[in-house]
Amino acid sequence: MALTRKKSKKQTVTFPLSVFETADTKEDLEDWLLSQNPEFIKNMRKARQDDMQVKGKDWQSLWEELCIK
């Protein structure tokens, strides 16, 4: 049985030169990209609202739910 590999299209990501020049790490560039993503911002605002309304779960509950501890 032969395995075939899909050819992936090359994707280009563009940054403003000022962002690229002032970024110290790859993570800085990732942070900038996330800050430009409306869906990510919407999800973070929802998470913040849930947090302020104490709708989140504590770490112990998450660990037990995910069988981590």
Image (cartoon, rainbow, N blue to C red):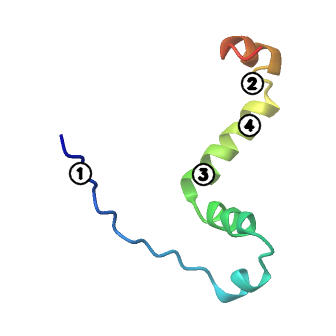
Q: In terms of secondary structure, where does tag 3 sit?
A: helix
**First in residue order: circle 1 vs circle 3:** 1
| Distance (Cα) linking label 2 and label 4 | 10 Å
- As rendered, which of 11 and 40 lies closer to the eye? 11
Question: Which secondary structure, mark 4?
Answer: helix
Q: How many marks?
A: 4
Question: For the residue marked with disc 1, what is the amino acid?
Answer: Thr
Sequence order check, earlier mark of 2 and 4: 4
> Of helix, strand and loop, which one carries label 1?
loop
Residue 36 spot, x, y in % from top left? 61, 66
Residue identified by numbered label 1: 4
Q: Vertical placement of 54 versus 16: above or below? A: above
> What amino acid type is highlighted by mark number 3?
Phe
Q: CA distance from mark 2 to mark 3?
A: 18 Å
Question: Depth check: 8 or 65 in front?
Answer: 8
- Spatial separation of the CA atoms under disc 3 and disc 4: 14 Å
The secondary element bearing badge 2 is classed as loop
Label 4 neighbourhood size at 10 Å, few (<14), some (14-19), many (20+)?
Answer: few
Mark 4 vs 1, N-terminal side: 1
Are the two marked residues, 2 and 3, in contact with CB atoms closer than 8 angstroms?
A: no
Q: Indicate which disc residue 56 carries.
A: 2
Question: Which of the pair 18/48 is nearer the observer?
Answer: 18
Q: Is residue 69 above or below residue 3?
A: above
Q: CA distance from mark 4 to mark 1?
A: 46 Å
User: x%, y% of residue 29?
Assistant: 69, 70
Q: Are marks 3 and 4 in contact (CB under 8 Å)?
A: no
Q: Kindly report which numbered mark, 3 or 4, lies closer to the viewer in this rendering.
A: 3
Residue at 73% x, 18% y is 62
Q: Amino acid at mark 4?
A: Gln
Q: In the rendered image, which residue does mark 4 sit on?
A: 49
Amino acid type assigned to the residue bearing label 2 in the image: Gly
The residue carrying pointer 2 sits among few (fewer than 14), some (14 to 19) or many (20 or more) residues within 10 Å by Cα, namely: few
